[in-house]
């Protein structure tokens, strides 16, 4: 968990590595038309939930002890928004890393 997941293509707009606990991050440049990618890794016992606002994207990831769990979600945005945030809600028993790109 010392590194954030690698974005397969595009530009990184938010990144966190070796994180513990809840966090909210602004998406640099807001939300543009096109694809928004969210990559998450976690390890530890608990449920991690990612929220992307203002588009209302939300998804969970079940995290387990001794194993890195990953998910990769893509969302096609039809219109831009001037401001966007990604937030992670997670118990303190979970370490996580995240990359958001477009």
Image: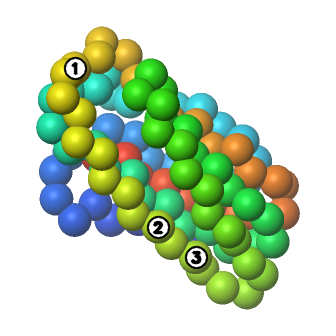
Considering depth in this image, is 77 or 18 the residue closer to the camera?
A: 77
Q: Which mark is residue 69?
A: 3
Residue on which disc 2 sits: 71
Q: Residues within 10 Å of mark 2 (few under 14, many from 20)?
A: some
- Of 98 and 32, nearer the camera is 32
Tell me where residue 15 appears, x and y as whole percent: 44, 47
- Residue at 83%, 55% (x, y): give it: 92
Q: Secondary structure at mark 3?
A: strand
- The label shown at residue 27 is none
**Residue extending farthest bottom:** 66
Instruction: Locate residue 36, reporting x and y percent.
Output: 28, 43
Apparent side of residue 62 relative to residue 26 in the rendered image (left or right): right
Residue displayed at 22% across by 65% down: 8
Q: Is residue 44 above or below residue 53?
A: below
Q: Is residue 32 above or below residue 60?
A: above
Out of 84 and 74, give the one closest to the viewer. 74
Helix, strand or loop at disc 2?
Answer: strand
Q: Residues within 10 Å of mark 1 (few under 14, many from 20)?
A: few
Secondary structure at badge 1 equals: loop
Name the residue rendered at 31%, 22% in the picture.
30
Q: Are marks 3 and 2 in contact (CB under 8 Å)?
A: yes
Label 3 and label 1: CA atoms lie apart by 31 Å
Decide if residue 47 is on the left or right side of residue 52. Answer: right
Q: Earlier in the sequence, mark 2 or mark 1?
A: 2
Residue 79 pos. (x, y %)? 19, 22
Percent of width and height locating residue 32: 20, 27
Q: For the C terminus, give its image quadrant.
A: top left
Q: Residue 80: which numbered mark, if any?
A: 1
Q: Is residue 35 above or below residue 4?
A: above
Quadrant hosting residue 19: bottom right
**Earlier residue among tags 3 and 1:** 3
């Amino acid at each position: 968990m010392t590194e954030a997941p690698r974005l397969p293509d595009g530009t990184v707009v938010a990144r966190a590595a070796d994180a513990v606990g809840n966090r909210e991050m602004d998406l640099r440049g807001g939300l543009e038309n096109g694809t928004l990618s969210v990559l998450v890794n976690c390890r530890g016992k608990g449920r991690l939930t990612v929220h992307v606002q203002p588009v209302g994207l939300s998804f969970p990831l079940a995290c387990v002890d001794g194993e890195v769990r990953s998910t990769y979600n893509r969302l096609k945005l039809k219109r831009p928004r001037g401001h966007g945030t990604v937030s992670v809600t997670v118990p303190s028993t979970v370490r996580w890393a995240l990359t958001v790109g477009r």
